[in-house]
């Protein structure tokens, strides 16, 4: 008995008068990248076969043969013995051909009521779903790393910047927790995209549905494509089910936002590590030296992450462009969805892993503690915040509390800053008599207001940088992680 699929090295079917040219074969094949969908492909096929048997579309012995064949194929792929053939174009045809070789007619019956169009859409969704589950975990790990470092740095003060000019003192922990908020939203977005990804195209067949009495909801349930209440999630329109890749685009958009956040953090780490700031150090294993300048230690990892962000944005643009001109339903263009999607997943996962460790360190099993995360130079941060009159707003607020209208207070403080500049000192170093020259209401208690710690403690409203607020936020995040 000959296998139709094996004859692909000759021609598709009796309809074709000549085989594909070698160049066209190479041009159209996807097996060397889509073989990574193999597990999803086998799970989808098994769920489909079980349903076909339950619906009496294939026999019980066919199902048993298919299961046996798929078990062997799984083992062959895992051990590396499986022979992937370019002639067989893609992961789907490679697995189906091997199945038929192993179990005969049952293998040929598997494709009843389905097409590669609904098969590939199902595989990509299943694959992406499990990758998103990993990504959500990695996002939680990164948030935990940031919260760990924050916990040790609640009282450490660094200059908060606007326009990269010293603005107001903030707690370093508060600064780190800003990123925790961003990564928490990134995880939320992933959860949301997962919900729309987790729907079953299978049963849409080539484009119009199928003449066989399929039970699509059964297949969805057996693949875990269910909502929170356990209801089967099935694509409700066959044309849409086979053709749209909006779920992949949405994922790449969510990944792009996450990489954008990583990139902002990278930019800060790079600045903070420069000699001009000296705020933090990252462990040597995340840096590289220079081949010519022996003194150099370069922040390659944050720089590369900043660079790889552009690559993920490019994939988003690529996928959007891939879809925009396609008429319904499936077109071969869609085969081009895979490499950008795979690369987005790989880049995001690697980046999240490396950042968790670079920030929070590595668990030492002997001590149960994390070691080798970022090192914080609190003195350098403090020195930097003192250079920029960071408590000028506090002085204005002080005057307002003494009865001056805010706009007048703003002007009064501008004069005080000018005086401090000409004395080459901080506002808090101006003698009381000089300060009183700007406004008679100023008293000795102004020095508490002008201190960094006083400034920090004063911002004790929800979302503010006062250590009391920051501690509440840390507790909220910890509770969220549990
Ligand atoms: N390798 C193809 C893809 O990735 C599978 C679907 C092929 N369908 C077709 N009608 N040629 O999209």
Image (cartoon, grey):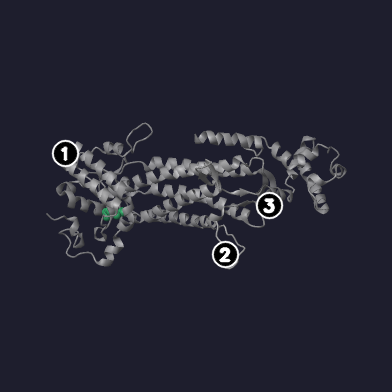
- Tell me residue 317's x, y (percent): 44, 55
Tell me how far mark 1 sits from mark 3, CA to CA: 74 Å
Q: In 3D space, how far apart are the residues under numbered discs 2 and 1 (Cα atoms)? A: 66 Å
Q: Which mark is residue 165?
A: 3
In the image, 235: left or right of 12?
Answer: right
Near-viewer residue (143 or 14) = 143
- Residue 367, above or below 86: above
Pointer 2 and pointer 3: residues touching (CB < 8 Å)? no
Residue 438 place in picture, x, y as percent = 84, 44
Q: Secondary structure at mark 2?
A: loop
Task: Place residue 29 in its image quadrant.
Answer: bottom left
Q: Earlier in the sequence, mark 1 or mark 3?
A: 1
Judging by the rendered image, the residue that carries numbered circle 2 is: 290
Residue depicted at x 78% and y 48%? 426
156 to 270, vertically: above or below: above
Residue sticking out furthest to the left: 1
Give me the residue at 28% from left, 50% from top: 117
Q: Which residue is mark 1?
A: 60
The answer to whether the beta carbon of the residue marked 2 is less than 8 Å from any atom of ligand 1 is no
Q: Position of residue 34 (x, y in %)?
A: 32, 54
- Determine the secondary structure under disc 1: helix
């Amino acid at each position: 008995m000959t296998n139709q699929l094996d004859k692909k090295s000759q021609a598709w079917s009796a309809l074709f008068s000549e085989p594909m040219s070698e160049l066209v074969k190479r041009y159209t094949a996807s097996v060397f990248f889509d073989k990574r969908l193999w597990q999803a492909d086998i799970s989808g096929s098994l769920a489909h076969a079980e349903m076909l048997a339950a619906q009496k579309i294939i026999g019980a012995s066919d199902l048993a043969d298919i299961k046996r064949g798929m078990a062997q194929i799984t083992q062959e792929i895992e051990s590396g013995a499986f022979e992937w053939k370019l002639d067989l174009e893609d992961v789907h045809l490679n697995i189906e051909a091997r199945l038929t070789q192993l179990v005969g007619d049952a293998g040929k019956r598997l494709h009843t009521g389905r097409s590669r169009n609904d098969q590939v859409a199902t595989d990509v969704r299943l694959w992406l779903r499990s990758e998103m589950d990993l990504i959500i975990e990695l996002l939680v790990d990164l948030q935990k790393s940031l919260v760990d470092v924050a916990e040790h740095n609640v009282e450490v003060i660094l200059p908060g910047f606007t326009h990269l000019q010293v603005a107001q003192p903030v707690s370093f922990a508060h600064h780190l927790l800003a990123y925790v908020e961003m990564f928490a939203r990134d995880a939320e977005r992933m959860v949301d995209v997962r919900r729309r990804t987790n729907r079953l195209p299978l049963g849409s067949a080539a484009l119009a549905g199928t003449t066989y009495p399929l039970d699509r909801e059964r297949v969805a349930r057996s693949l875990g494509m269910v909502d929170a209440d356990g209801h089967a999630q099935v694509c409700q329109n066959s044309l849409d089910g086979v053709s749209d890749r909006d779920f992949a685009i949405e994922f790449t958009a969510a990944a792009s936002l996450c990489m954008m956040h990583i990139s902002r953090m990278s930019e800060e780490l790079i600045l903070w590590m420069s000699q001009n700031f000296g705020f933090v150090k990252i462990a040597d294993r995340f840096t590289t030296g220079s081949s010519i300048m022996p003194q150099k230690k370069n922040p390659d990892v944050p720089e590369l992450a900043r660079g790889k962000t552009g690559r993920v944005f490019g994939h988003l643009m690529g996928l959007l462009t891939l879809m925009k001109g396609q008429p319904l339903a499936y077109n071969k263009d869609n085969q081009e969805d895979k490499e950008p999607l795979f690369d987005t997943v790989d880049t995001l996962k690697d980046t999240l892993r490396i950042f968790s460790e670079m920030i929070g360190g590595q668990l030492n099993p002997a001590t149960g503690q994390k070691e080798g995360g970022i090192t914080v130079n609190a003195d350098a941060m403090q020195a930097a915040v003192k250079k920029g009159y960071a408590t000028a707003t506090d002085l204005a607020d002080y005057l307002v509390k003494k009865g001056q209208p805010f706009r007048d207070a703003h002007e009064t403080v501008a004069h005080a800053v000018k005086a401090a500049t000409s004395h080459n000192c901080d506002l808090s170093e101006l003698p009381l008599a000089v300060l009183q020259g700007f406004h008679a209401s100023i008293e000795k208690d102004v020095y508490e207001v002008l201190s960094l710690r006083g400034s920090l403690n004063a911002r004790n409203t929800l979302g503010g940088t006062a250590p009391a607020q920051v501690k509440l936020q840390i507790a909220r995040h910890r509770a969220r992680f549990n």
